[in-house]
Every structure is written in C-alpha cells, then in structure tokens.
Image (tube, helix red, strand yellow):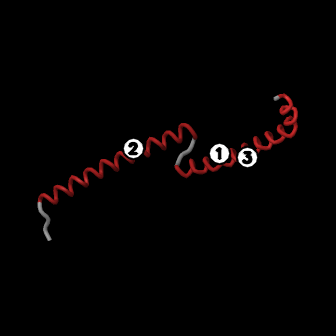
Amino acid sequence: MAISIRRFQELEAKIERLQRELNKAEGAYDELLKRLKKEHGCESVEGAECLLEDLEAKLKKAEAKADRAAEEFELEWGEVLEGVR
C-alpha cells in the first residue's frame, strides 16, 4: 500500500512537530533537575520525592507541636485573657 506524497508530507510535519515538543520537554526537565540540585541538593526526581516525604513528616510534627503549645497556652492563660476583654 503506497501513501500519497501529501500524506507523507503531513506525517513528516507531524513527526517534526512532535520532535520539537519532545526537545522542549526534555530541556524543561533538565532545567528542573538542575534547579533541584542547586536549591535542594537532589540528584534525581526520586531524591526529591524522598526529600519531600521527609519535609512533610517534619512539617506534620511541627504542626502537632504548635497545636499542643496552643492548647497549653489556652489552658494556662485562657481565663486570664477572657478577663481582659
């Protein structure tokens, strides 16, 4: 089955467009990896995911600690502060 010259040119143009899109995506990916390395010391996406998990765990602990401190403050000073209003 032979294809027409027009169909061939259409396919060729589509391939060239897709190649440009791929090159653009690869460039963006490379730039993001450089930024991850520079800003966070991560060598790969997997390393960044591990770092993110660690930071999320630390954030969760810090939030829990802040919540406890707020509760303790409210228990200790709540009545005093209500009297000031």
Label 3 packing within 10 angstroms: few (<14), some (14-19), many (20+): few
Residue 25 % position (x, y): 38, 47
Looking at the image, is mark 1 or mark 3 earlier in the sequence?
1
Label 1 packing within 10 angstroms: few (<14), some (14-19), many (20+): few
Residue position marked by numbered label 3 in the rendering: 61
Residue 21 in the image: above or below residue 34: below
Relative to 60, is 35 on the left or the right? Answer: left
Residue at 52% x, 48% y is 44
Looking at the image, is mark 2 or mark 1 earlier in the sequence?
2
Instruction: Report, in whole angstroms, how far the alpha carbon at label 2 lies from the one at label 3.
Output: 37 Å
What number is the disc on residue 55? 1
Observer-nearest residue: 67 or 3? 67
Relative to 9, is 71 on the left or the right? Answer: right
Instruction: Report, in whole angstroms, how far the alpha carbon at label 2 lies from the one at label 1.
Output: 27 Å
Residue 14 % position (x, y): 24, 54
Residue 4 % position (x, y): 12, 62
Q: Amino acid at mark 3?
A: Lys
Observer-nearest residue: 39 or 55? 55
Residue position marked by numbered label 2 in the rendering: 27
Relative to 18, is 63 on the left or the right? Answer: right
Quarter occupied by the N terminus: bottom left
Residue 56 in the image: above or below residue 83: below
Q: Amino acid at mark 2?
A: Gly
Observer-nearest residue: 3 or 77? 77
Relative to 27, is 32 on the left or the right? Answer: right
Disc 3, SS: helix
